[in-house]
């Protein structure tokens, strides 16, 4: 990861690495299962339809890129951008494997989007905006490339309390002295709303979307957490002596959510939308 201010906040994760990209790709099916309805709502609120030109910022491995491309059809176009060429390669592979020919990928700085002004009908950002050190500047760059009356739609996590899968893990990491991802930096409704407004967008709306993740046992939850490059990294940065008690504390807290049918972990997204 470079040190440009537009890059995600530095928490030690090499966002451009092949390992991170591959881990993201392996988790695609599980993500689509619980994120899919919220992603569809984000695309709805962005006004994406047949023939739309869509910019996907911080696209990662392209889960939402594929969904947007399927929606716009062969007369539409989706450009997926990210700082990681490795992630974008997997996004392009996913689009090709789905039979899509209307997707392009390009490595690009989210604060300085090197594209023509007024050239897209919609800009989307799924679970990326809260990771930037200056989300308002990123939103201004998105706004610049929108056509008049075009929309920006961003999906973020709400609060740590409403997202215990991530919140418990990162909260424990922080108490042990680690610097975790700022997943909840835009998690309060008014914070997301004000950030969108400060970028110059108008007609701002913020909607909460609830979801649930289901696991067979607490042990499965811990295994999945350890497979997540983003969440595992916060624990890996601790000393060797601290890691075991940290994981034990995470397991203790998550076990309180286990019942006869396994572990059901609630979650909540916010979708913020603004118009140019």
Image (cartoon, rainbow, N blue to C red):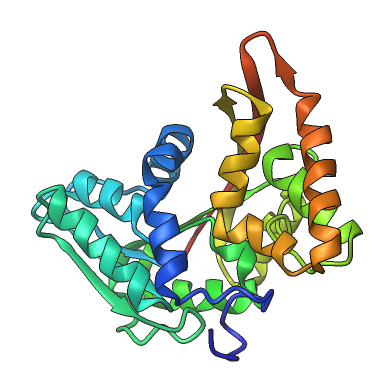
Q: Is residue 24 above or below residue 98?
A: below
Q: What residue lies at 20% left-to-right and 60% top-to-bottom? A: 93
Give the farthest residue toward the front: 241
Q: Is residue 250 above or below residue 66?
A: above
Q: What residue lies at 60% left-to-right and 60% top-to-bottom? A: 230
Q: Position of 269 compared to 84: left or right?
A: right
Along the line of sight, the residue nearer the viewer: 39 or 43: 39
Give the farthest residue toward the top: 260
Along the line of sight, the residue nearer the viewer: 204 or 21: 21
Q: What residue lies at 26% left-to-right and 72% top-to-bottom? A: 105
Q: Position of 52 compared to 203: left or right?
A: left
Residue 226: image x %, image y %? 61, 50
Q: In this orientation, does residue 272 appear?
A: no
Residue 5: image x %, image y %? 62, 87
Q: Is residue 163 above or below residue 65?
A: above
Along the line of sight, the residue nearer the viewer: 35 or 79: 35
Q: Position of 212 compared to 34: left or right?
A: right
Q: Quadrant of residue 184?
A: bottom right
Q: What residue lies at 25% left-to-right and 46% top-to-bottom? A: 49
Q: In this orientation, does residue 271 appear?
A: yes
Q: How many marks?
A: 0
Residue 202: image x %, image y %? 56, 60
Residue 170: image x %, image y %? 76, 54
């Amino acid at each position: 990861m470079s040190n440009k201010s537009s890059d995600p906040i530095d928490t030690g994760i090499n966002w451009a690495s092949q390992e991170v990209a591959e881990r993201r790709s392996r988790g695609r099916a599980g993500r689509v299962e619980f994120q899919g309805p919220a992603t569809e709502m984000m695309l709805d609120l962005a006004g994406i339809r047949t023939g739309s030109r869509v910019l996907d910022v911080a696209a990662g491995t392209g889960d939402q890129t594929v969904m947007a491309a399927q929606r716009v059809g062969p007369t539409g176009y989706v450009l997926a951008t990210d700082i990681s060429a490795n992630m974008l390669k997997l996004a392009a592979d996913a689009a090709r494997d789905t039979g899509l020919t209307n997707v392009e990928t390009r490595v690009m700085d989210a604060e300085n989007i090197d594209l023509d002004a007024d050239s897209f009908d919609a800009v989307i950002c799924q679970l990326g905006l809260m990771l930037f050190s200056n989300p308002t500047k990123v939103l201004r760059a998105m706004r610049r490339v929108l056509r008049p009356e075009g929309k920006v739609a961003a999906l973020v996590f709400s609060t740590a309390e409403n997202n215990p899968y991530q919140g418990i893990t990162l909260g424990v990491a922080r108490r042990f002295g680690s610097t975790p991802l700022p997943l909840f930096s835009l998690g309060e409704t008014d914070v997301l709303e004000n950030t969108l407004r400060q970028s110059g967008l108008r007609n701002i709306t913020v909607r909460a979307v609830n979801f649930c993740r289901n696991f067979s046992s607490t042990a499965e939850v811990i295994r999945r957490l350890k497979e997540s490059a983003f969440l595992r990294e916060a624990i890996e940065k601790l000393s060797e002596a601290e890691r075991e008690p940290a994981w034990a504390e995470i397991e203790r807290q998550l076990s309180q959510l286990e019942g006869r049918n396994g572990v059901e972990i609630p979650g909540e997204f916010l979708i913020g939308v603004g118009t140019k």
